[in-house]
Image: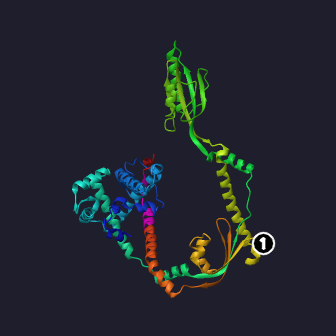
Amino acid sequence: MFAKIAESKWMKFVLFITTFAFVGTAFVAIVIYKFAGNITGAAVVNGREISLQEFYYQVNVIQSRLENEGVDTAPLKKEIYDQALEAVIDRELLFQEAEKEGVIATDEEVKKAILDIDVFKDGDKFSKDRYIALLTGMNISPQLFEEIVRKDLSAQHLFTFLNASFYITEEEIDSYINKQLSKVSGDFLYIKPEPLKISEEEAKKYYEKHKNEYTGKEGKEVIIYRIDIDKSNQEKSEKLAKDLFLKLKKGETDIKNKEIKIVFRDVVYDSINISNIPQELKEKLKEISQDKKIIFVKTDDAYYLSKFIKSVKEPLPYEKVKEKIYAKLEEEYEKKSVKNLYEKISQEKEKDIQNLKKKYKGELENIEDETVRDIIVRYGLTPEYMKLFIKEKQGIIPLKDGILVYSINKVTPPTAEESEELRKLVEPLLRNEKYNTLVQMYLDRLRKEADIVRNERIFR
């Protein structure tokens, strides 16, 4: 994979601009996180900190790539940040491994790679001014970009050794071709469970139990206290307000004092329509939150103290979510009924397809010399069933919406001509698949053995 990139026309600026973005997409896996200390960078990998500049550069890279594909990135901030952080962590892991193996890219290699990137050229020659301008536009220093290039080239060296360490056997190729092109003949019985009708009462019961899952606008439950200012004894009023503030800070809300009145206790939304509070407090209430729990406002005649209780979400009315509830219940019923049907058929002593057809009113199809690959597509099965149809002559398979019972009476292997034709296409695909699997295993091992601390504050 990396060899092909290196041979391409640009040396593909993408090689450096995406900076192993594939790690954040094709090879996403579990990273060991430790929450500790104050991290000034994006993460710490084996005691080495990754700068925020490198992280945000990676964020910009991923955003630009998605936007060029016509994707609206606005609602994808968390996903992009996750992907970017995974990418910079994995890049650092690979670089550290390259250091251990003594295959770090040299200054000369870094220089040559940058000089060969077409986007930095003015005509056929590298332009330093263009180089600086483009990096400045991406908010990245030449030093950091060169560091990223060095890491990527070093990782390429690692993967070059990995690429040379494996091969595809003839047996693997033959097995794959045989599964793809073998033709089978036999009976295939498709049985659907009895349709289930969902009652209105059942749907309403589900709504009452799960209505917090069907929410609309978000709100905040607050309690607002008022202390009238005694013009003849303002110090007393001020002391009451200070004491109340301290109690609210401690989490107390059950205040028993006739001079402290609760003027509101309910949920407020973006549009605050509380008639008995001043406009200044209405504006301030927009700021109240889990992080800013107490709002203090003084007017000419009163002190107002507001306490944040909790965030709430207003459930949508039943009629607005009725269709979703029916769809959800139908999906749950379908899974349950397919499971029950599968267990019932599996326990049948007599599994003759003709008898099962009569008993369960299934659709029987006799297939003659059809490739396993086509049968997989026909019934929406996953590829692992290719081997099953060749090895197991009879069986029962649960599908998404029913059960497939099959009885195969003949398996015809592909001809030499058919095998040879597919072999030309298969070998590079299998090699690439096996290589990607090895890369993923390699990265998984590095992650498992690494000490990684992630800066969760960048997601706030």
Q: Position of residue 333 (x, y in %)?
A: 70, 59
Would residue 218 be found to the left or right of residue 140 on screen? right
Prevailing SS of the magenta stretch? helix
Would residue 294 be found to the left or right of residue 203 on screen? left
Q: Residues within 10 Å of mark 1 (few under 14, many from 20)?
A: few
> Which color scheme is applied?
rainbow
Above or below, 182 against 318 in this view is below
For numbered disc 1, what is the local secondary structure? helix
Q: Quadrant of residue 18?
A: bottom left
Q: Position of residue 262 (x, y in %)?
A: 60, 26
Above or below, 458 against 174 in this view is above
* Quadrant in which the C terminus is drawn: top left
User: At 42% across and 56% down in the image, what residue appears?
Assistant: 66
Was residue 198 drawn as part of the magenta stretch in this picture? no
Would residue 260 be found to the left or right of residue 329 on screen? left
Q: Position of residue 226 (x, y in %)?
A: 56, 23
Above or below, 423 against 256 in this view is below
Above or below, 362 against 223 in this view is below
Type of amino acid under label 1: Lys
Identify the residue under disc 1. Answer: 359
User: At 68% across and 55% down in the image, what residue appears?
Assistant: 329
* Quadrant in which the N terminus is drawn: bottom left
Seen from the viewer's position, the closer of residues 329 and 42 is: 329
Seen from the viewer's position, the closer of residues 175 and 295 is: 175
Q: Position of residue 398 (x, y in %)?
A: 66, 69
Residue 348 seen anywhere in this rendered image of the structure:
no
Would residue 99 be found to the left or right of residue 301 on screen? left
Bounds of the magenta segment: 442-454
Q: Residue furthest top?
A: 232
Seen from the viewer's position, the closer of residues 204 and 260 is: 204
